[in-house]
Amino acid sequence: MKKNITLIIVLLSFIFVPQLDAQFGINVGIAVPIGDFADDGGAEGDGFAKTGFNVGLSYDIPFGAIEGLSWTITGSLLYNAMDWDKAFDLVSGEDMDGGKYLNIPLLTGLKIKYGISETAAMFGMATAGVNLSTMTDAKYTDGNYWEEYSVNTVGSFAFSIGAGVILMDRYSLSLNYMGLGEPDHEIDYSDSDGYSGSFDEEQKISAITITAGIFF
């Protein structure tokens, strides 16, 4: 229930926003997995995620009464491959295709900007919302034998804190911590021997993103 309410609030924020002097932005960068998401020792909960990329959109709505303060709405995609060589300890003749982590955090919150010169400003932001998490389909092969895995999409509570600089009120560089929850995925399985089934797998997801962006 809590996840559904959070999702509704975020979606309404995207739809019912005043225009005012709002700024629309796009950004791209790298997504560096940390914690359990990045661990590759083989322990329960290890995600084996590799450094990937991040693309995002933002919409900043200034509060007229408070200089430098704005309401921000963000949506982004984090793409991280999985290190199957370590996860499955693959040997010669074995192969694993697919299985890329896809996370789409839809967040909203506050952003504060403080000018440090005529052309530069620092900013900080804190947002929360929902993360939509899934993986691309994966297939394991060993000779004529194969296994296929399909992961459903689930939502979880997410938050982000970040800071950065804005140059000429147009270009941005930012560093963000993203806590994307611990989604419980249902994974469907089938193999060439005719067996099929499903199982649940929880994965805690967190990452550092470093992005460059532009405002319009």
Image: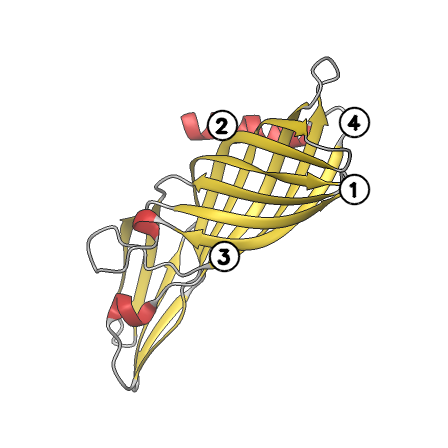
Q: Earlier in the sequence, mark 3 or mark 2?
A: 2
View extreme (left): residue: 43
Few, some or many residues within 10 Å of mark 2 (<14, 14–19, 20+): some
Q: Quadrant of residue 190?
A: bottom left
- Circle 2 residue: 6
Toward the viewer: 202 or 49?
49
Observer able to see residue 42? yes
Q: Amino acid at mark 3?
A: Tyr
Q: Earlier in the sequence, mark 2 or mark 4?
A: 2
Q: Amino acid at mark 1?
A: Phe
Few, some or many residues within 10 Å of mark 1 (<14, 14–19, 20+): few
Q: Earlier in the sequence, mark 2 or mark 1?
A: 2
- Circle 4 residue: 19
Q: CA distance from mark 3 to mark 2?
A: 23 Å
Toward the viewer: 216 or 120?
120
> Residue 101, position in %: x, y?
43, 56
The label on residue 216 is: 1
Residue sitting at 75 percent across and 17 percent down?
64
Observer able to see residue 203? no
Q: CA distance from mark 4 to mark 1?
A: 13 Å
Image depth: mark 1 or mark 3 in front: 1
Toward the viewer: 62 or 172?
172
Few, some or many residues within 10 Å of mark 3 (<14, 14–19, 20+): many
